[in-house]
Amino acid sequence: MRVTQSLNQAQFLAALTQIESNLSQTQNQISSNLAFTTPSQNPVAAGSVNNYDQALAQSQQYDANANSAQTRLSTEDSALSQVQTELQTLRDLALQANNGSVSSEGHTAIAAQATQIQNSLLSLANTQDGNGEYIFGGFSTTNRPFALTAGGASYAGDQGQRQVQVAAGQTIADGDNGNIVFNQIKTGNGTFDASAAAGNTGTGVLGASAVQNPAAYDGGTYAVNFTAANTYEVRDSANVLVTSGTYTSGQSIAFRGVQVTLSGQPAAGDSFTVAPSTNQSIFTTVQNLVTALQTGTGTSATQAKLNNSLGNAINNIDQALAQTSNVRATIGARLNTITTQQSVSSSQQIQLKASISSLQSLDYASAITALDLQNTTLSASMQAYTLTQGLTLFKYL
Amino acid sequence: MVSDIFGISVSALQAFQAAMAVTSNNIANASTPGYSKESVVLSAAAPQSNGTASVGSGVNLTATTRAFNQATNNQLNTSQSSLGQLNSLQTYTSQIDNIVGTTAGGISTALQDFYSAWSAVANTPTSAATRQALIGKAQSVANSFSRISSQLNGLNTDINTRITADVQQINSIGASISKLNQQIVVSTAQAGGSPPNTLLDQRDKLVSDLSSLIGVSTTTDTNGALNVFVGNGQPLVLQGTTTTLTTVGNPFNSAQLEISSSTAAGNVISGYITSGDLGGLLAARTQAIRPVQNQLGQIATAFSQAVNSQQNAGLDLGGQFGANLFSVGGPSATASSKNTDNTSVAVSIANVGALTANDYVLSYKAGAYSLTRSSDGSTVALSGAGTVASPLTADGLSIVVSATPASGDQFLIQPTAQAAGSFAAVLTDPSKIAAAGAVQTSAANSNVGNATISSGTVLNAANPNLLNTTSIQFITPTTYSVNGAGSFAYTAGANISLNGWQVAISGTPAAGDTFTVASNAGGTGDNRNALASANQQTQGILANGTTSVNGAVSSLITGIGSEAQQVNTAQAAQSAVNTQAQKNVQSVSGVNLDEEAASLLQWQQSYQAAAQALKIGSSLFQSLLTAVQAA
């Protein structure tokens, strides 16, 4: 085959260009630490890296979401812990007032303290988070949820509960609405509520009450009527006689699975009601307590009335404390979930980064070997060129 | 006798001088492109007989021939056409590779940021700052779509310019070839059949140049004229005349230049031009740019539809249903400029999930519609009648024809070609972002049972009664009424759907317990809609719900990379083929300087020998004269 000088020259130049282009690409890879800079260099890996990038960004976003929920839940938890402290103080005050030796001035002083607690509770129920959102407003986070009224407090929020995405397919509530925390508190013992009729003239005071036999309890409303000072009868809501008996102070009266304890001496015509628990706002409980304390205790009958009111208040405060504990328990569970999720996502992110790196990052050893080889090729071809270019017959003519 | 020696020597001196001239000319043209090495053909002059023996009478230079092989040359031309096609195609595939490939500032980053911004809104729905950030991210998603689209449009403009330039150059080469044809025919006849080598070289060089612009086939007439054909046999040069190529607007899109031949009466022959630089430009348009633009458009359409419909299902800070966040251009339908009537076609998207990245041609012939894919010409099943009541439907499209078209009418339907370019973020008021769900539920505080109600989801945001307050009251623990009417059996945990919403009540209700479903207008802290929007990131919204937006972007990146890689590989392979073809041609026609140096020496020595013969002849003659004088 005949080889011509001009073709030789052109081919050499083309080869040189190719080697230099390869060399520049390798240099580029080394300086950017990327195995490929355009998809054409590795189309499948480019597509996969794009997917992994998204998964990584999403996982990091889930972390940010979890942090936001964590902050909000911590704010809620600390507010509720203060609510518990306030309620505990209130309970102590009610117990103190329930002692017959406290004077009417003492009652007034306790009422004033209870009013203070009412205000503290209000302020806690209107807690705002770092973004100025009311944490107990449900979905309605920009309106102040609670305001005091004559009978307790009004609630301007709703029953919404915001969820935050903490992992693919996993959401977590970042708060609880104020209605659940402060308003939906069962009265009495949580199942039924025993109360004295307002017009009682005796000194009968309700004591502990409980469901003795849940299977026998039907959730009905019953009246314990005293037909005489030592005789009572229990009638259901249809006024049908359920049971009757003879009363002595401190005796417990049992019927239809429930048991209530009475002490003191009821008068004939006095009546006590056993009704299913209803929801009552903690603010109403405090307000009722204050009102009861402010009502004088001139006679033994009014003293019994105060004692019954205080007993009710203590029951209701206990329910509120239980409710607050329940909510705090769910907050703790959510915070635990977040912590678990954070450690899962951090290992997931390490995994994703490793995957991205294995596809995208440069293998320096092989890149530098390639660079070296390309360099050698370049200088060898240059040398070959200068050697062969000198070869021409004309030199010898 | 002596005069014979003179005659023979002179003929030899002349022949070798000419041979040395040819060799020098070879050396001089060693680097001239298209030059074919020439060589002399010597023949012995007719012998003269003196009666007993015949003695030669010298040497004749009978011809100067060029070293040329038509077959090898044709091979090179074909290979150059293929290389030209791949070179120009590669220009565009690698540009697209660069435009889309750089992930930073690309669509996927913008999309990730957008969905993260939705999450941030979900974390603090009432914060104006996070809402504003979302508006910004939406803007940058729109920008990245339209930026890539405008870069692709820029490539189309560039292609138009280059097509025009190529066509001009092809025509001018064609004109030169036809002029050379005339000269070759004349000079061949004049010189008594001896070939005009330089003119032939020039013509072959022009054909070679032409073949890198456009694939050609040639035939040679007996008079030496060359006929050149392009495309599907359209003549470019016939003997001494040229048929020019022209550029015409695409029948469906006048801004897109196509190739026509002046003999083809305005018919587009672009489809037949598959090689050469021009073939590469046409291929880049249909094979590299359009699929990317359509796929981008498909992603933009599906993405915007998903975001907007979620927006429309939720409530903004003012308690109103959310406004559209994005706007996107719908499908376009263009009537062919060759249609004989004014029938128009309106296309809308019936099912965004079934949408493809194809363009279609709707044809009406013999009373029937047919729909073909532009990319491969395959037929797509079509149903319906084309009327408003019964539109033609195929691949997620709904097509309404304004009137019965004339037979032979054609319409180009581009479902997504315009989408990415026209994609825009239209919401500027942060408070209009619908982060909240449309409805909220509540349980009455007077409820005695322990039943709870779910927060409620919107099934149909278009239901006019969606925001009406509905109360669900239990008549007994196992039956409930809705707004005081009816009696429905209660199953714990089962969905209750009404007015476009769906809730579930679970637990044990007591008679008299009441639950309410109402408008969430005041629920500015609600984030259910924002959560749903953020979750769209991983939801399948393309290809019948199988592909997420990011998945589609990934496969677009892989597709573009594969296409560029494939073209790169083909180009490298064709380069090697072309080098080999060049070598083959050069081994026949090229000038090797060593070889010429040897020839030069050979002719020089022959010349010296002939001169020596002349000298001997002269001395013979001198001896004769001396002998005569002496006598």
Image (cartoon, coloured by chain):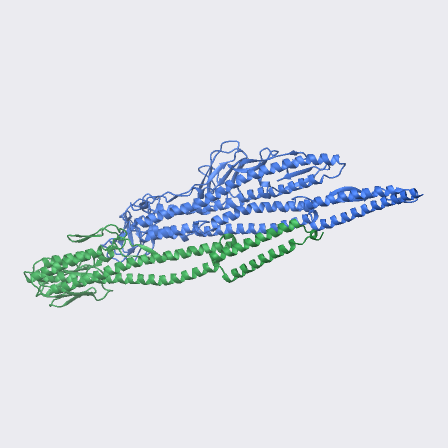
Chain colours: A green, B blue
Please state the horizontal and vertical placement of residue A67, each as a whole percent of the image: 32, 58
Name the residue: 47% across, 60% down: A358
Q: Quadrant of residue A266?
A: bottom left
- Which residue, as the protein is rendered here, is positioned at the far front? B630
Q: Is residue B310 left or right of residue B29?
A: left
Q: Is residue A277 left or right of residue B331?
A: left
Q: Position of residue A124 (x, y in %)?
A: 21, 57
Asked whether the viewer can see residue B392, the reply is yes
| Residue positioned most to the top | B341
Q: Is residue A267 visible?
A: no
Res B84 quadrant in image: top right
Residue B202 in the image: above or below residue A330: above
Q: Nearer the viewer, residue B486 or B501?
A: B501
Residue B382 position in % (x across, y down)? 50, 42
Left or right of B194? Residue A357 is left
Percent coordinates x, y for residue A126 in the rendering: 22, 54
Q: Nearer the viewer, residue A323 or B86?
A: B86
